[in-house]
Amino acid sequence: MGFYPCKVLLILTVYWLYLTEDAVIRRIELKISTWTFLPEGNSAAYGRYFSLHVFKSSFSLAENGEGIHVLHYERGQKYETHPDYFVDKFNQENGGNRMATVLMYLSNVRKGGETVFPYAEAANTQPKDETYSECARNGFAVKPKKGDALLFFSYHINATVNPRSVHRSCPVIEGEKWAATRWIRLRSLENSRSNIIQQ
């Protein structure tokens, strides 16, 4: 297992996990597979849950999932409002768009650090008390709690982009925030990696 840190927009530190076999990651992958109904290995079972014509007959976390990214936010660090889907041609041709995100909270945050969906349908109906940060007041907010996971889709069932899936991470006010993401693509990344290497 290796951790390779880098700064993203100077607002948080991201670690990419490069793993071959690891028992903890294996359990996480199994939970994600069970929770999202996405098969771990090669399987056409996904078609029973979603009837998107853009999928080929084989769809799995192993082929379509990006590696787990570990995110670390220190006091004052945040991530501005952004989509997880791509608008550039390169990513759309190589693995396709990110159709789903699993965001796992690895730590509690004393104050701040909420994940906010500013355009969610329930954005302005969620009751919020004084424990929410000012940043979390505009949109549907999820507080980071160690052991919790958040699943959201960047695509509608009819294979169109869901612009309401854009989100942000509010600044950490007290403490620090650790999280991990697992993005699932529309097409196989394995085939895309082979094509990129051949080019």
Image (cartoon, rainbow, N blue to C red):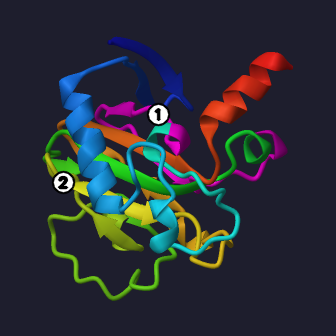
Q: Residue furthest right?
A: 199
Please check the rendered image and state whether residue 80 is part of the magenta-colored stretch, yes or no: yes
Say few, some or many: other residues with alpha carbon within 10 Å of mark 1 (under 14 / 14 to 19 / 20 or more): some
- Residue 21's quadrant in the figure? top left
**Image position, residue 107 (x, y; %):** 16, 40
- N-terminal of the two: label 2 or label 1? 1
Residue 186 seen by the camera: yes
In the displayed structure, 120 sits above or below 23; it is below
**Image position, residue 44 (x, y; %):** 51, 58
The residue wearing badge 2 is 148
Q: Residue flagged by tag 1: what amino acid is it? A: Ile
> In percent of the image, x 19 and y 25: which residue is there?
23
Quarter of the picture holding the N terminus: top left
Q: What element carries label 1?
A: loop
Say few, some or many: other residues with alpha carbon within 10 Å of mark 2 (under 14 / 14 to 19 / 20 or more): some
> In percent of the image, x 55 and y 73: which residue is there?
164
**Closer to us: 141 or 182:** 182
